Image (cartoon, helix red, strand yellow):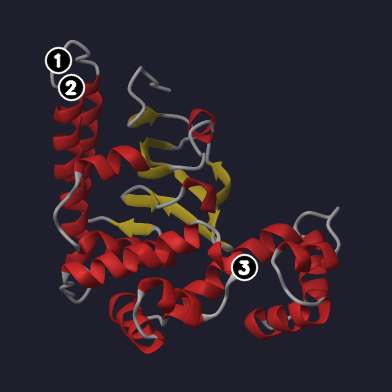
Amino acid sequence: MEHTDFDGIIFADTLQDFNALRHTGRVIHILCSGGNMGFTFQDTRYHIAAGDYVILPNATLGSDFSDSGDFQGIFMSLSDLFITSIAIRSNYGIIGHLSLLQNPVMKLSFHDFRVCKQAMLCIRERMEDKGHLFREELLGSLLTAHILDLYDIHARRREAVRLSEHITFLLRKFIELLYNGEYIRHRSLDFYASRLCITPHYLSEICKEVSGRPATYWIDRFTLLEITRLLWQKELSLTEIAEKLNFSSVSYFSRYVQKKIGISPSEYRKMTFRV
């Protein structure tokens, strides 16, 4: 694992080293060049092979990583702070972010794989030039070029959507509210619309335009991820989980889970502990 005085970008070659990089405030990129690897992301199991590129927009959303003995690839961990500092002007980032929350895996063509691999190796090589007087700016520029290539790869695979600065700002703030845990206290669409000073209908429409899903889908998605995470903790009772998530009663909590995933929290817990 390469961890220098600069932690905006950190590289790793093995799953063991990579696991040390998965913590809050990091964005994870994985380029698989051989073998295979599996992981769970937002309650879905993924398996990747050579030519797959994974982007986890929040490192803590991935779990249960495993790899084959012959796995080869590049792990790149980026700090949110450094990504923000390079200030990419394109508004495509929010589109890609919402898309990656639904599926974090991109299957690359041979050409795109080569472009991504060369870019990552170049960034890694230039990180070694610690005497460069503008090292962080240089690395920021190289990372910007790589991210724009990823935008291009992603955009070519889906219908082009152009976003105004205003819509980009609103969606970014909406997702930030969810990442900050507001869904624990507020699951009403009205709350988020009010915080953004727009109507609930408008918030849902712009979410649907960009991700194909209304705003309530994203509120429920973050909520259900936290619910399933807590249900895995055997020591917590359903009453304690309901209280942690600010449900007014266990019965209301159970009805919410039943409606959203089709089974009660007790049944879900029994099913997961049997696995």
Work out how far the residue at label 3 is from the one at label 1, CA to CA, in angstroms: 47 Å
Percent of width and height locating residue 232: 75, 57
Q: Mark 1 belongs to which amino acid?
A: His
Position above or below: 206 against 165: below
Indicate which disc residue 135 carries: 2
The answer to whether the residues at label 3 and label 1 have Cβ atoms under 8 Å apart is no
Indicate which disc residue 93 carries: none
Work out how far the residue at label 3 is from the one at label 2, CA to CA, in angstroms: 42 Å
Residue drawn 40% across the image and 52% down it: 57
Say which label, 3 or 1, has the lower sequence index.
1
Element carrying mark 2:
helix
- Which quadrant holds the N terminus? top left
Percent of width and height locating residue 15: 51, 34
Percent of width and height locating residue 109: 22, 56
Residue drawn 31% across the image and 69% down it: 170
Q: For the residue carrying disc 3, how many other residues have a C-alpha within 10 Å: few (<14), some (14-19), or many (20+)?
A: few
Q: Nearer the viewer, residue 262 or 121?
A: 262
Residue drawn 16% across the image and 29% down it: 137
- Which quadrant holds the C terminus? bottom right
Say which label, 3 or 2, has the lower sequence index.
2
Percent of width and height locating residue 54: 38, 51
Residue 219 visible in the picture = yes
Q: For the residue carrying disc 1, how many other residues have a C-alpha within 10 Å: few (<14), some (14-19), or many (20+)?
A: few
Q: Which residue is mark 1?
A: 132
Residue sitting at the far top: 131
User: Which of label 3 and label 1 is nearer to you?
Assistant: 3
Indicate which disc residue 185 carries: 3
Element carrying mark 3:
helix
Q: Mark 3 belongs to which amino acid?
A: Arg
Position above or below: 109 against 171: above
Residue drawn 74% across the image and 84% down it: 255
Q: Based on the displayed image, in which of its 4 quarters is residue 237 positioned?
A: bottom right
